[in-house]
Amino acid sequence: MPPTQPDVPHVVIAGGGVCGLYAARTLVERGLRVTVLEQEPQVGGLAAGHLREGNYYDLGVHHLHAFDQAIFEDIRAIMGERLIPSEKVALIRYGKGYRRYPLEFMDLLTGIPLGTLVRALAGMTWQQLLNKRLTTEPANAEEALIRLYGKPLYSFFFRDFTHRYWGFPPTELSAAFVRSKMPRLSAVDFVKKALGRLGMKEEAGETVEGATARETLWYSPTGSREMPMALADHIRGRGGRVLTEAPLLAVETEGDRAVAVCHGLPGGGEVRLVCDAVINTVPLPLFVKAFQPAPGAAVLDAAGRLRYRPMVVYGLLVRRPRVLSALFVYFRDRIFHRIAEPSASGMVVEPEGHTVLLCELMCEIGDDRWQGGEVSRRRLIADLAAENLLREDEIVETHLIHSHHAYPVFALGFEPHVQALNDYLKPFANVLSCGRQGGFCFPNMHGAMRMGADAAEEMTRRLQPEARHAPPPVPVIGTEDEGIYLPDGEMPEDLEPTGSQD
């Protein structure tokens, strides 16, 4: 049970993904009281593990990068030998075979027909000349991609894949999508460096930096779930609370402050939790809609205009020890846009001699892909066979794992709507919103943890401006299954039941 001294601020964190958990981990080290609310039965958010018939299935394989050295060393100290290194091997189905991803220069040369290659290089060179004369920002993602790669390469490589991935053409995507989501391709960088030597140097920063082809990634024997679980155990070991099956229902406000949060209970009912501050990591529109008194009509309209792209993972247990020659493979014209094989990263699969494939499909909630309908299943099997990956009789089990809010959609004109929600939250001195969902952005796992840590530090300064921030002590970790659910019948002391729900 956490301390209940009235002079120790209590922070409620909405969302038990890696961003929210790392925020909580930072706060408990600063001596604050913390309660994390997670609506699912398990912590982790997009990095959660889903147990099906004795094996764990991720929402795609989520590795930890070591780009943020402080975050990486902290997680390694918490997890110890449970954190497993593996060399990054990523491929993309491209041209007549599989190429390294991100594409390198030789992949570009060997993957494109000669005529198309000549047009692509000429188009890129011509575009760099044109860019020198452009004074306006790209109007949409199509224009941004053409400015980066030239029209021939955009038409050959990016246009159709982007359309299939998001469900609408790049002309309906914001140019901000390219800056936030598109990785730098070393093949294109090679050409641009050559052009730079001819005086056609381009400004940096148009795409995501750090998409390296050779890198060490970090995983765990039962999947990415172990990282958020280890964080949750650490939080509990420091006196914090991590509640599962506790969806956010309302945020009560008085003036410019949030004063209480209401959340649901596993068996039904509602609980009111008094707090001194709130850090949000659940989808930004849902968070704003939970405020009481309710925001004005303009704010609610902005919240209703923001979209998230759903995704479903078809998790396959396969009667074969290994299928892919990479950790994951991207596809441009199949029903799945990526397949991952977590056993290649160190996951243990039962029974022996079997492996698990995670086939990621973009979809809409309720459509045939989402429901695992016959049309989608037959297409999945046909595409696997067409790639010479699997035969239908090698698939032992199929499990569907859903994500309602897999990716924020940077639709054309989304920026004012995000700004309207942030402007609404800004006057609340004890409220912050961050992470992929709460910040409506695209961080990877270590980036989301960093956002959580920064939010926690900022909230600590707001609540305790005089506090000295000493380095966190060495973590004390429990077992991986410790504390995932409250003991039966236990009610934390400062939770106030306010009635039941049907």
Image (cartoon, rainbow, N blue to C red):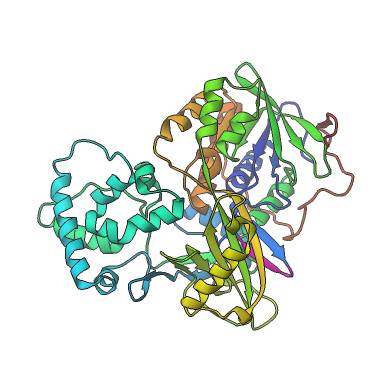
User: Closest to the observer: 91 or 145?
Assistant: 145
Q: Residue 281's spot in the image, x, y percent?
A: 59, 40
Q: Is residue 347 above or below residue 158?
A: below
Q: Residue 257's spot in the image, x, y percent?
A: 62, 21
Is 145 one of the magenta-colored residues? no
Q: Is residue 84 above or below residue 263?
A: below
User: Closest to the observer: 9 or 50?
Assistant: 50
Residue at 49% from the left image edge and 25% from the top image edge: 423
Question: Image quadrant of residue 350?
Answer: bottom right
Q: Is residue 219 left or right of residue 237?
A: left
User: Closest to the observer: 70 or 233?
Assistant: 233
Question: Image quadrant of residue 151?
Answer: bottom left
Quadrant showing the C terminus = top right
Q: Is residue 267 above or below residue 303?
A: below
Is 55 one of the magenta-colored residues? yes
Q: Which SS type dominates the magenta stretch?
A: strand
Q: Residue 219's spot in the image, x, y percent?
A: 57, 65
Residue at 57% from the left image edge and 23% from the top image edge: 428
Residue at 61% from the left image edge and 27% from the top image edge: 463
Q: Is residue 10 left or right of residue 391?
A: right
Residue at the limit of the structure toward the front, as seen here: 375
Q: Total of numbered circles in the picture?
A: 0
> Can the viewer see residue 220 in this picture?
no
Q: Residue 49's spot in the image, x, y percent?
A: 66, 60
Bounds of the magenta segment: 53-58
> Can the viewer see residue 321 in this picture?
yes
